[in-house]
Image (cartoon, rainbow, N blue to C red):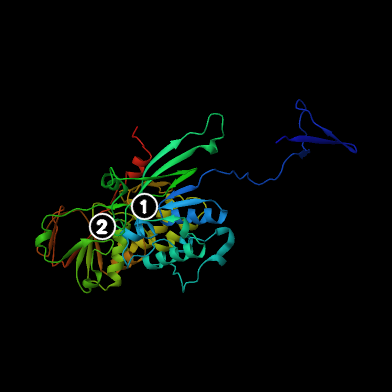
Amino acid sequence: GKLDLYEKKGCQLKRLRNVEQIPSKVLVKGIEHFGRKVESYPHPWVIVGAGHLGLRTALHWQKAGIDYVLFDRKTKIGGNAWNGIANKWSKLQSEGPHYQLDYDPSCGVSTLLPFSRYSYWPTRDEILGHFHDICTEYNMWPNLVLSTQVTGLDIVPEPKGAEERLKSYTVEHVRVGDMFQKAQDVTDLGFDMFSGSETEQMTASCVAFYPGALSMPHRRTFPGEDIFGGQVGYGFNDEFNYEATQGQDGIVIGMGAFAVENIRTLMEHNSGKFCVIARHHNLLLPRMLSWYVNQSRLPPPAATILRAMEPMYRYYGKDPWSYFSVQSNGDRSVASIKQYTRWGIGDVYFLGVAYGKVETIEGQVKRLKHRTAVLTNCRVLTDIDHVIKCLGFDSDLGIDRINRTKRS
C-alpha cells in the first residue's frame, strides 16, 4: 500500500514530498499493522520425515492453521533413529526437555512434562510414547500419511508475471506397506526397489525434508566371526542380547556416540571388563559440559571446552589437548576441534575407566579366533565372551536423488 509521511508544523501536519529530507520525527500513515505479512498459498505444504524435527515442524504448522501433509515410509512415527536404530535400552544422550515436541522456550518451563511421565534422559519407548501423545492431543493424525515413500519431486514454476508464492511442486509417492518398519534401509535403496511401480502425485506449495542423520548402519563381517564361539552382533536395534552379558568380558568396536551408549548399556547389565577398540581416541563430552554447551547462547570457544574436560580426563589418565582432533597454540589459549564422529555424551564411560571396567585401545580388529581378537597393533585379546560392532553410519543419498542434486 501507499505510505505518507507527515511533519508537524506548528498546529498543522505537513505531508512530505518525495524530494524533501525526512526529519527525525514523522507521522507515518498507511501502515495496516506491524506484524509480518502472512501469505496465503493455493496448495498444501508437505513434510517428508516423521522423526523429531518433522513432527516438530508439523506441530508448528498445526498450531498456525496451515494445511499440510506429512509423509514417512515407516508404519509408525519416530523416524529411523528411534524406529530402526535405537533398541529398548537406548536413551536420549542430550538433555531431554528441549526434545519435547511442544516445548516452547518463550513459555518457560511450565510447558515441560513432569519427570513421572518423561524422564530427563528418556528411553526409546518414552520418546515414541511422547510423540504419539502429542499427535493425539493436537489431532495431527489426519495429516500423517505413513507407509509411504516419496520417490520424486518436480518444480512447477509460477505463471509469468505472478508472485513466487504461486510456484508449486509435484510430489510423487508410493505405498510401501510395512517393509521399512524394522529395517534401516536408506531412501537410496528404496528407489531401486520401487522402480517402475505405479506412483501417486500431489501438488504442494512448500516441501520440507527431514531425512535424519542416522540412516544406514555400516556393516562389516570380520574374519573369524564364524569360529569365535561367542555372541557377535551390532549395537543397535534389537540385534544384540545385552542381558546375556552379565559377568562376561568383551570388546566394543568403535568410539562414536553409539559405542558410548553401548558402554552404558553394558554397565547397566553388570557386564564384566570390556575393551573399546578404535582407530583414534575420540573426545567425549562429560554430562555437565554437555549441559553447558546446550544452554549457551553462542558456541563456546574450543579452548574453554577443552579446559572444562580436563578434570574428567584425569580419571582417564589422558590429556584432551593431545588428541588427534585438537589443534592449539603453545599456551593453549586458542584451539580448534575437528572430529568427524558424533560426540558421545555421558559420565558412565569415565566411571568405567576409573573403576577398571573399561580400557580403550587404539587399533583395529584384524581377525577373530575362538574367544580371541587379534588387533592391528599386534595385541591379542583372549578370553572374550562377546563382540559388539558400532561402526558408524553410511550416507543416505536418496534425498539428493529426489531433488535431482548433482555433484559439482
Res 90 quadrant in image:
bottom left
Percent across and percent down for residue 346 are 37, 63
Tell me the quarter of the image containing the N terminus: top right
Kindly state the secondary structure of the residue where label 1 is placed.
strand
Q: Crowdedness of circle 2 by 10 Å Cα count: few (<14), some, many (20+)?
A: many
Looking at the rendered structure, the kind of residue marked 2 is Cys
- In the displayed structure, 325 sits above or below 125; it is above
Neighbours of disc 1 within 10 Å: few (<14), some (14-19), many (20+): many
Q: Quadrant of residue 24?
A: top right
Residue ID at (56%, 53%): 65
- Identified at 53% across, 55% down, the residue is 62
Quarter in which the C terminus is drawn? top left
Q: Where is residue 141 in the image (x, y as percent from the top left)?
A: 46, 60
For disc 2, the marked residue is 390
Q: Is residue 70 visible?
A: yes
Q: Going by the image, does 35 lie left or right of 87? A: right
Q: At label 1, which amino acid type do we have?
A: Thr
Name the residue nearer the viewer: 113 or 79. 79
Mark 2 / mark 1, whichever is N-terminal:
1
- Residue furthest to the right: 11
Q: Is mark 2 on a helix, strand or loop?
A: loop
Give the Cα separation between the discs numbered 2 and 1. 29 Å
- Count all numbered tags in the image, as a single digit: 2
Q: Which mark is residue 112?
A: none
Residue 240 is situated, as x and y percent measured from the top left of the image, at 23, 65
- Residue 302 locus on image (x, y percent): 42, 50
- Report the front residue among 167 and 122: 167
Q: Note whether residue 329 is visible.
A: no
Q: Which residue lies furthest to the top in this view?
A: 19
List the residue tagged with mark 1. Answer: 148
